[in-house]
Image (cartoon, coloured by chain):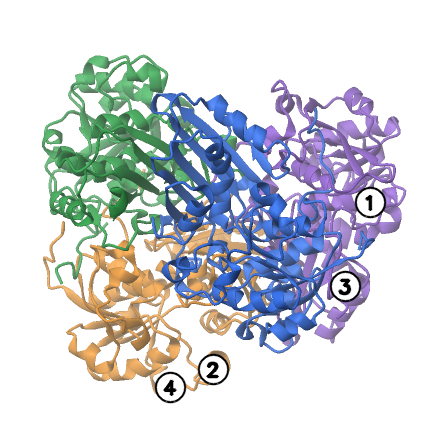
Chain colours: A orange, B purple, C blue, D green
Amino acid sequence: MQHTLNETPIRIAIVGAAGYTGAELASIAAAHPLVEVVALFASERASNAAVRVMSDIFPRLRGVNDLPIHTATVEAIVACGAKVIFLATPHEASAELAPALLAHGLIVIDLSAAFRLRDAAAYPAHYGFTHPASDLLAQAVYGLPELNRAALADADLIACAGCYPTSVILPLRPLMNAKLLNCSRPVIVDSASGVSGAGRGATTKNLFCEVSFQPYSPLQHRHQPEMRQETQLDILFTPHLLPLDRGIVSTIHVELMPGVSESKVRETLAAHYADEPFIRLLDAGVWSSIAAVERTNYCDISLMVDAAHNHLVIASSIDNLVKGAAGQAMQCMNIRMGCAQTMGLLPAHSVGVAI
Amino acid sequence: MQHTLNETPIRIAIVGAAGYTGAELASIAAAHPLVEVVALFASERASNAAVRVMSDIFPRLRGVNDLPIHTATVEAIVACGAKVIFLATPHEASAELAPALLAHGLIVIDLSAAFRLRDAAAYPAHYGFTHPASDLLAQAVYGLPELNRAALADADLIACAGCYPTSVILPLRPLMNAKLLNCSRPVIVDSASGVSGAGRGATTKNLFCEVSFQPYSPLQHRHQPEMRQETQLDILFTPHLLPLDRGIVSTIHVELMPGVSESKVRETLAAHYADEPFIRLLDAGVWSSIAAVERTNYCDISLMVDAAHNHLVIASSIDNLVKGAAGQAMQCMNIRMGCAQTMGLLPAHSVGVAI
Amino acid sequence: MQHTLNETPIRIAIVGAAGYTGAELASIAAAHPLVEVVALFASERASNAAVRVMSDIFPRLRGVNDLPIHTATVEAIVACGAKVIFLATPHEASAELAPALLAHGLIVIDLSAAFRLRDAAAYPAHYGFTHPASDLLAQAVYGLPELNRAALADADLIACAGCYPTSVILPLRPLMNAKLLNCSRPVIVDSASGVSGAGRGATTKNLFCEVSFQPYSPLQHRHQPEMRQETQLDILFTPHLLPLDRGIVSTIHVELMPGVSESKVRETLAAHYADEPFIRLLDAGVWSSIAAVERTNYCDISLMVDAAHNHLVIASSIDNLVKGAAGQAMQCMNIRMGCAQTMGLLPAHSVGVAI
Amino acid sequence: MQHTLNETPIRIAIVGAAGYTGAELASIAAAHPLVEVVALFASERASNAAVRVMSDIFPRLRGVNDLPIHTATVEAIVACGAKVIFLATPHEASAELAPALLAHGLIVIDLSAAFRLRDAAAYPAHYGFTHPASDLLAQAVYGLPELNRAALADADLIACAGCYPTSVILPLRPLMNAKLLNCSRPVIVDSASGVSGAGRGATTKNLFCEVSFQPYSPLQHRHQPEMRQETQLDILFTPHLLPLDRGIVSTIHVELMPGVSESKVRETLAAHYADEPFIRLLDAGVWSSIAAVERTNYCDISLMVDAAHNHLVIASSIDNLVKGAAGQAMQCMNIRMGCAQTMGLLPAHSVGVAI
């Protein structure tokens, strides 16, 4: 134990600990000098295997997190003593749990989509359930720190941005705000994601021998309305499954307003994100890859303009489990709890950056 | 040896045998009941390792093709006794070899891009060399059998279609011809290819530990002008590297003319390709994948229309080494030599198709 | 359809068509010029999805095998008109089905372990069930053609060799028979297999994100008694899971009798397998790999002797779904039905082998 | 920059920064609260690309380590101001550099094999060069902290253990010391390693499309004499290439002395490693995997005894780039410099371990 909790620790609980996002939260929490994980919870089915502990499910966590996993009930969560509750649960479970936890004065950081969309009607349409707590949709703060930092600082219900949306909104919103984009044209987004994005459920399509590269749910994926809400652009979104554990690259095609140059685009993003430690704007000719962001909280943005077509192509990459889920949730918590936002998410110190 | 060559065999030679496309040609030729591989050739560097035979380089071919690999010179190729010469060689090598081989009355099936583009000026612009035989560009027949069968039947110089272009032209051209597409809008093509598309050269970027998912050469890839030439559409093409050995999926976004429905698109393709054994038009809701076409000569086409946007998304998949290279070349040869076009490329017989 | 069934076709049925081995049988059957697949069967659960056809489950088979999948009952199988029944079913299902099918005069080729072991007591011990037809164990012929060809020629119940055992028995038995091995010492076998060996069941451990490299069931795997039975050696077997779709490499360590040289070992195997088209004995210094045998019916054998230790190390590789299952089953059928044994399993013709 | 260097930093330099081990050192150093990387060096070829910085070669290090890479000369290394020099260089380069650096009073931590073997004659035999500084072989301390901690505390030349040897020596040496093993019998070790173990050189065999699973250099690998030296056992070692980026599993077969039980083996290891934070002895029935140790400094040890054969099988896993190279080197440095040995190598704090 190389660092001691030399300030009052932030006591957290992870609900949905038996999934990939829950495990990633446990890893990140272990690296955070001020966080103490006080309890883990999962659904009855996932937690009921008697005395099961976290590292039985995820052997790499042995020695890092060997806590038992309890069945997730409001009573148990409230009783565990945590101040911040991370919900890495299915959408409906989050929608049920959050109001009760908030009522007990807890801070809820939800990694599902349950509180991301402002329009309650979107839930039956896109998620197949009527929202049981639609009054909270207006109160929830969208958890994308680079674009929403101020609101996060005192939010009690944080709806962390989705994985694909994070990779798409981060490059587009500053350009949209700067009025560089021709909003009358649809924006084409082709993304590819590693298999962990599909969760840890035992389904045939996610078996090792079944995974291939292919599109799925073109123009109908649940993240399309989320992207549209947060960019105010008419996005046409096609996700693809990728034979990798983790990582997303989004390739984005958008028409620029007449006369907008590549330099202008580049400068706009550079200026907007100048002080953001997790946004890396890549040099011309260098393209975002999954390898460069895997197991980090970075979002890498690369781009090029075809001036003859006023066409901007952006490739943006993140790790879906980190910046697309658990890392972003921890970044939100850091902001909410007054920690440095990089705590637990960046190596101790970096060198040569200023050279 | 289960089939005998019970008709006069077609004597072929493979030039560029030490590359992935050359090896795929050798595999396919072994499965072709009427083809006899009489000689293999490679560059001096690849062939000069003394008594090297094909299966020393590609151990899976042991017992299938154990021929020695000779240095590729016009004299040696002409002397080997083959009637049909497959050039799986670099663009410039093909451009140099083809005229001399044609002058000796041989049939040349070129898998490089040396004779694909009709405009000689495109070669210095996109391929970095001045074409040494530009007079042949008008004579060469573009090797995409489904769209060019008649011309292939008596072509002596066949310029096989490129891998990415095959996956893009096959779905688009019938729709273009039927005037269903809004040609005033650019067509967005995001493709992903397995690593074999980059060849067998020992470069750092193709090392096992370096390959990731990422775009490369957006809007500037050499296949973009080829796609534009063959579709007459204003294509904006972004290829991506994929951590798989082989396979391509092209995701194509195009605006339809007003009022064109998904059924109309589907019927147009179905009618156009009704008799084509290698084109599989997938049912609505089923999407092309690399797994389904890997190691086959099929092109799978899947699609969907967002009527509100007049937007058509197509996902088209092939194996870059088969339908995108060696299989297509053999299909062209079958047509040129009067064989059934599926010979060597489909299993002996299929069942249930008519049920 | 390039070959016609110019002799009376062999009518076969595949039971267990919804699994990986069943699909591989369907692929191989399509390439076999004399085989006609007349019906497909699966368990009620796998077949009951209404009008499901084979290519809905395995999209790569579209156009190759689009037959419907029926529920496997003895009545339906008998009524389908097939003469040869391939059972790609769980052990217990095979043990139940085989006697009834044999009673109807059908030829049964079983790919499970139900009839591999001669000792009925081994079934409760290693497979967890009491054998319902133990009288057939003496009658069943072990399906490893290279070592059992004569008996297969008129067998009505063929118990195809297991995947791991195939890779281990083929190199060891000729050496054992020639008395080159020190039988008083245990033989150490460390094997690694691709994930398809675990079947197509939707279990968490076979998910894309869960598969890693690791041993499982050391010294306790069900194939250990099968290897011991067929080699009469005291084998200690440790299998490993490998992050690949298919393929097995078995690394075998055995003590030689004093004075036995590497040449002697090599000559013994070369002589024994001189006429076997599917055994490739590799040159000294070349080692078996999965890449070289993937999607083939070959078994590659490589070896080396450390004379100071009288120690022989053998690496033997196969494709678990082909030579380890469906290919071997078809090879057995070829022998039983009087076809050339390579039919459907080797390309039409090979070149250069005699050079 | 979340932690400040609140004590005098340890100034280090990395020589061989352009390789995979060098990059891993840079990553680990960034996570170490007391380390400051003052300079990076590489061979003239790797460093001479003008103003190249570390993150141009390894894009994931952008923002983490953007230092320039200088040509490695003794003068430049001495002048850079570092106190501890990590040599992630080829064996011969290390053998040349180390004496000169030691002569300048620097601490040298060598990750090559240049100073691992005590017998100078082993270098021409196994590494192909005559050792230029054989007098240092007796002075070098073998860098395997769990078995050599005391000697490391004041070593100026540390020869970090090899990757495969680390995975083999850690489980065997305590058993050997406790006299549980039958030393008259050879120990069989079959290991498998991810491709990064072969380095970052651009060779055909390490291309993405060429890597498969297969053994290489059985009984002749350079790590065999190192394992023998450090265990005093007659090890017969066969490494295998594995289609993964990183990770090693060693499966070890050894005969126990009569009557030694599995409990005895397990207790011996548990007792020996009770206070070792990086050794995880797995419960019976749980087996080491690469997934569980990837990107960590752990060595996971699992085992089972077949009492009837007095046979012990051990599976031991590490990450070849961390516990097998850079992590182990940093652990050695921590011991040498008086830091907590887990610094930079374990997350900030763990939970539940004592529960």
Q: Nearer the viewer, mark 1 or mark 4?
A: 1
* Whether residue A47 is situated above or below residue B322 in the rendered picture: below
Question: Which sits in the foreground, A271 or D305?
Answer: D305
Left or right: C123 in relation to A152: right
Image x and y of residue B98, in percent: 80, 30
User: Is label 2 in contact with label 1 (beta carbons under 8 Å)?
Assistant: no
User: Is label 1 in contact with label 4 (beta carbons under 8 Å)?
Assistant: no
Q: Residue at x 68, y 50 (%)?
A: C334
Q: Residue at x 23, y 84 (%)?
A: A103
Alpha-carbon distance for marks 3 and 1? 27 Å
Q: Nearer the viewer, mark 3 or mark 1?
A: 1
* One can see residue B210 in this view: no
Q: Which element is circle 4 on?
A: helix
Mark 1 crowd level (few <14, some 14–19, many ≥20, 10 Å Cα): many
Give the residue number, with chain letter if any, for mark 1. B334
* Whether residue D8 is situated above or below residue B177 in the rendered picture: above
Alpha-carbon distance for marks 3 and 2? 36 Å
Write down the chain letter for disc 3.
Answer: B
